[in-house]
Amino acid sequence: MKVGLFGSSGIRGLVNADLTPVLAVKVGLAVGTFIGAGKVFVARDTRVSGIMLENAVASGLMACGVEVHRLGVFPTPVLAYLTKSAGADAGLMITASHNPPQYNGVKVFDREGLAYDEEKQSQIESIIKEEKFVPADWRNLGKEVIEGIDCQAYLEMIQENVQLNRKWKIIVDPGCGATSLIAPTIFKNLGCNVVPINAQYDGYFPGRSPEPNADSLKFLAKVVKEFGADFGVAYDGDGDRVAFVDENGVFVDFDRVLAAYAAYVLEKVGGIIVTTVEASMIFDRMVESRGGKVVRTKVGDVYIAKAIKEFGAVFGGEPCGAWIHPKLHYCPDGILSSVLLLKALEEKEESLSEFVSQVPIYAITRKSVPCKDQNKKEAVIKVKELLEEIFPDYKQLSTVDGVLMKLTDSWILVRASGTEPLVRITVESESLKTAKEIMEKVSVIVNRAVEDLEK
């Protein structure tokens, strides 16, 4: 087993290579040992490996005397919400989120609907590594429950907190993932005129990549424009991320819509907003101009959720479409985020393009360099030394997550991916030319650092 079983968003890996049924059984055994005999909800996204891994996880849990409620295909935020509202001791989600279909993973939530933090993850890893499982006596094995829990409580939560007065025309693209049935239903319940595309379960994701981004949503953008819709919305494979297309058929930049919504929240309630080291500097400028304070964390919704709770923040999110609304629950929730954004547009009497137009546009470039998992962190350490040599006049340096270097009108972030064998580079500047020049220099030294380690 590799060191560091958990990444920035649970356990993740290639099916039958990194993530095998044997490992999945051990995860079930470890969680069952950690919580003791109790009740655990297990759900999955639409991936073809989901049932295989769900069976394995459930077996491990039942071996420890756990009552396993198998919910079937549910979005991750729905599982997290139900884990708390229906009184389970833990929730296990079988998903690889936005990763390609050959990947899968396991994400664990506690009884409060919070993803396991580093401390709990470390305890689970230790139990697995040392095989300190505590199986139940054969007389006290856990049982499987397939019926009895549905998504009604989640649907009611949304309807109680969001009422729309306008009949919005929206195009919904679940990407054949876990939101395929529930997302169109929720928008219809809110009175919207809904046109769904890619809204059938299919773990091969034939319609588009499970990662909703500008490239994968070109068809959605075309449909929004052709249908004269007000809004286009898309989700990743398990529904914890959301992406938007405006009324003109233009993909809305993740950083800009995140900053615009954060500003909207602050105008209503004020307070602290949480984001990661990877978010654009426009986030700070939008928040601080409205009297708010920004807290930055490592990349990963686990860290966002923990900081929101610790600082009593009113909102938090990552520039990948993972937004957390702590008033309602602590899991990133793509469906909830999209209906709350619609409500914000209605209150402000603005289109989506008008809503984000208040946010300045800076040049931001991102690149990923392939790097073996065991070399990622060492590569970033080497890059830090090289960055300090190349940019000796830097203004600030942070190692909260990778290396974040602030220059006069630009910043650089180099970090090891928490979910894939990659080193990620982000460069932002007020000038596109400057951003490209910096990215060229940083790419060279990252590639050099990786090559030296993999010779």
Image (cartoon, helix red, strand yellow):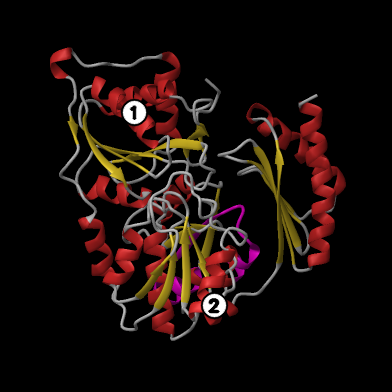
* Inter-mark Cα distance, 2 to 1: 44 Å
The residue positioned 20% from the left and 26% from the top of the image is 37
Look at the numbered disc 1 and give the secondary structure of its residue: helix
Q: Is residue 153 left or right of residue 27?
A: left
Q: Is residue 367 above or below residue 371?
A: below
The answer to whether the residues at label 2 and label 1 have Cβ atoms under 8 Å apart is no
Q: Give the residue at mark 1.
A: 57
Which quadrant does the C terminus fall into? top right
Q: Is residue 428 above or below residue 277?
A: below
The residue positioned 39% from the left and 56% from the top of the image is 333
Q: Position of residue 9 (x, y in %)?
A: 48, 41
Q: Give the residue at mark 2.
A: 225
Q: Position of residue 207 (x, y in %)?
A: 51, 55
145 or 202, nearer to the observer: 202
Read off the magenta span: 262-285
Q: Is residue 156 above or below residue 73?
A: below
The residue positioned 34% from the left and 32% from the top of the image is 54
The amino acid sitting under disc 2 is Lys
Q: Is residue 213 left or right of residue 43?
A: right
